[in-house]
């Protein structure tokens, strides 16, 4: 579940050759800096074993790299955007802000208890994070990769996603939540992934 990422074409060309060159990059003599990140945990609920597991795995990798003289940047943090978070906050009688502050501090204290040596705890509501996302989105927008269109489908609020009709049970119920999916029609912004299809396939 934990992702290992590294910016730039150099990484992509290495990764495309399979995991071995990638591991050599981490453990060999190559001192290219890189980031290791856990998932950014969703703050709709308190941390659980899964949150601890991925973070310990990432921490273990990061520590072994440091011991071999590398300088990985280990990132963890919370994703604080989503309808589900707003609903959890409402249920608990908190404002979304209060709720995010409370739950993300639970993650910080969990990782402290486990002695996780992360370099950055990133909250998606950090002004610095918002600035970077905005810059990135503007680049994508200026590049003409985003277009507006309509999407209609059966939506499960619990999963926060549209479902394929073939995956539903009892006609229109989510197989996970066993609640009825609602027909939603939205005007959305889409990313023109098809523009990059050839490059991705290569
Ligand atoms: Zn569902």
Image (cartoon, rainbow, N blue to C red):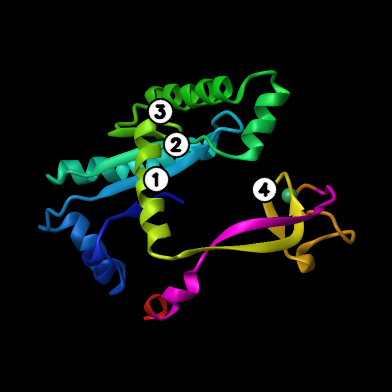
Which mark identifies residue 192?
none
Instruction: Say if 108 sits above or below 171 in the image.
Output: above
Q: Do residues under tags 2 and 1 come within 8 Å of each other at their CB atoms?
A: yes
Start-end of magenta stretch: 178-198
Q: Do residues under tags 3 and 2 come within 8 Å of each other at their CB atoms?
A: no
Q: Name the residue under label 2.
A: 124
- Quadrant in the picture for residue 149: bottom right
Q: How far apart are marks 1 and 4 (CA)?
A: 22 Å
| Residue at the (44%, 36%) spot, across then down | 124
User: Which of labels 4 and 3 is toward the front?
Assistant: 4
Q: Do residues under tags 3 and 1 come within 8 Å of each other at their CB atoms?
A: no
**Whole-percent x and y of residue 187?**
66, 57
Q: Name the residue under label 3.
A: 111
Q: Name the residue under label 4.
A: 160
Q: Mark 1 points at which residue?
A: 133
Helix, strand or loop at mark 3: helix
Query: Which of disc 4 and disc 1 is earlier in sequence?
Result: 1
| Residue at the (65%, 39%) spot, across then down | 83
Q: How far apart are marks 2 and 1 (CA)?
A: 9 Å
Residue 105 placement, left or right of 184: left
């Amino acid at each position: 579940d934990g992702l290992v990422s590294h910016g730039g074409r150099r990484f992509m060309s290495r990764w495309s050759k399979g995991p071995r060159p990638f591991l050599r990059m981490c453990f060999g003599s190559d001192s290219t800096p890189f980031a290791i990140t856990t998932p950014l945990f969703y703050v709709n609920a308190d941390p659980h074993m899964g949150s601890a597991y991925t973070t310990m795995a990432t921490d273990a990798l990061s520590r072994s790299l440091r011991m071999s003289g590398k300088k990985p940047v280990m990132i963890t943090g919370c994703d604080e955007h989503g309808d589900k978070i707003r609903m959890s906050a409402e249920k608990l009688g908190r404002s979304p802000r209060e709720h995010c502050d409370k739950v993300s501090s639970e993650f910080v204290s969990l990782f402290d208890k486990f002695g996780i040596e992360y370099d950055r705890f990133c909250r998606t509501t950090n002004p610095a994070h918002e600035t970077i996302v905005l810059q990135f989105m503007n680049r994508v927008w200026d590049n003409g990769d985003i277009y507006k269109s309509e999407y209609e489908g059966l939506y499960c609020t619990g999963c926060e996603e549209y479902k394929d009709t073939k995956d539903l049970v009892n006609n229109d119920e989510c197989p996970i939540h066993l609640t009825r999916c609602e027909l939603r029609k939205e005007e959305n912004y889409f990313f023109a992934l098809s523009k990059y299809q050839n490059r991705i396939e290569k």
